[in-house]
């Protein structure tokens, strides 16, 4: 999980980074930004984070304005404000913050809030993580339509774009939630949330794609989809 830390005080930013990497969550990586403007500039390039640790008082675009912009772009972002002044609590409702950390920051409190944020994400917004070259990316399950295997590469088809990375499609299936994704072909894994219909030879997806379904996966895919529909509708 990649975390954004935005604070113009390098001492506080380093403390948060050090604490987060020591928390019992594997694969945590932190990017530090010294201003709201530098963070927003980076996000404008198409980047995003599931969790933001945000100082409120900064030169230029302050933490509240930065958080409001992030919230308009990403309704799922977990924003944790860091401040020395409790009165700011009443000024940030528009940004829908997850928690507040009052300075001076304590390591045990930082870790506790981070673990709560991860638990919240796992409960409300599952993410698929993958790596391209040296960058780690994450995409919400809800944005994924299907995965397409192409030899040693996999292409993720989302609501807005397609992204290719090196991995076997069988390895992708192992890390996905089988309650939401199912394999329909040696080359395709689909998000059952995006299935419109299944017939003998193909699966029609919400994005308009008509994907082939192989005999080897047909019965299992149909059974999994029926279970998924029953779960979504509350029928047991």
Image (tube, grey):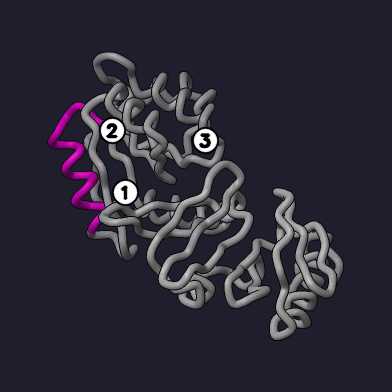
Q: What crowding class fits label 3: few (fewer than 14 Cα within 10 Å), some (14-19), or many (20 or more)? A: few
Q: Give the range drawn in magenta.
A: 7-21
- Of labels 3 and 1, earlier in sequence is 3
Q: For the point 44% across and 52% down, which residue is it? A: 138
Residue 96 position in % (x across, y down): 52, 31
* Residue 177 rendering spot, x and y as whole percentages: 58, 69
Q: Is residue 124 visible?
A: no
Marks 3 and 2 sit apart, C-alpha to C-alpha, by 17 Å
Of badges 3 and 1, nearer the viewer stands: 3
Distance between the alpha carbons at the discs numbered 2 and 1: 18 Å
Please tell me which residue lies in front, 168 or 64. Answer: 168
Q: In which quarter of the image is residue 40?
A: top left
Q: Is mark 1 on a helix, strand or loop?
A: helix
User: Circle 2 sits on which residue?
Assistant: 6
What residue is shown with label 3?
74
Residue at the image position 83 percent from the left and 74 percent from the top: 200
Q: Which of the image's four quarters has the N terminus?
A: bottom left
Q: Is residue 221 magenta?
A: no
Name the secondary structure under disc 3.
loop
């Amino acid at each position: 999980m990649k975390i954004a830390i935005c604070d113009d005080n390098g001492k506080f930013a380093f403390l948060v980074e050090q604490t987060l990497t020591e928390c019992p969550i594997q694969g945590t990586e932190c990017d530090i930004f010294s201003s709201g403007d530098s963070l927003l500039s980076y996000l404008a390039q198409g980047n995003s984070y599931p969790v933001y640790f945000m100082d409120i008082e900064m030169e230029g675009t302050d933490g509240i304005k930065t958080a409001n912009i992030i919230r308009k772009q990403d309704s799922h972002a977990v924003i944790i404000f860091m401040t020395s002044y409790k009165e700011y609590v009443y000024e940030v409702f528009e940004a829908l913050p997850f928690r507040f950390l009052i300075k001076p920051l304590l390591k045990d409190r930082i870790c506790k809030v981070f673990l709560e944020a991860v638990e919240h994400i796992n409960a409300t917004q599952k993410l698929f993580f993958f790596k391209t070259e040296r960058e780690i990316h994450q995409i919400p399950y809800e944005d994924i339509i299907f995965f397409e295997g192409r030899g040693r590469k996999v292409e993720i088809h989302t609501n807005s774009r397609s992204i290719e990375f090196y991995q076997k499609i069988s390895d992708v299936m192992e890390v996905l939630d089988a309650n939401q994704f199912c394999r329909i072909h040696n080359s395709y894994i689909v998000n059952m949330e995006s299935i419109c219909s299944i017939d003998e030879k193909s699966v029609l997806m919400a994005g308009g794609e008509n994907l082939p379904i192989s005999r080897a996966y047909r019965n299992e895919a149909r059974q999994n989809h029926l279970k998924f529909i029953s779960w979504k509708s509350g029928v047991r």
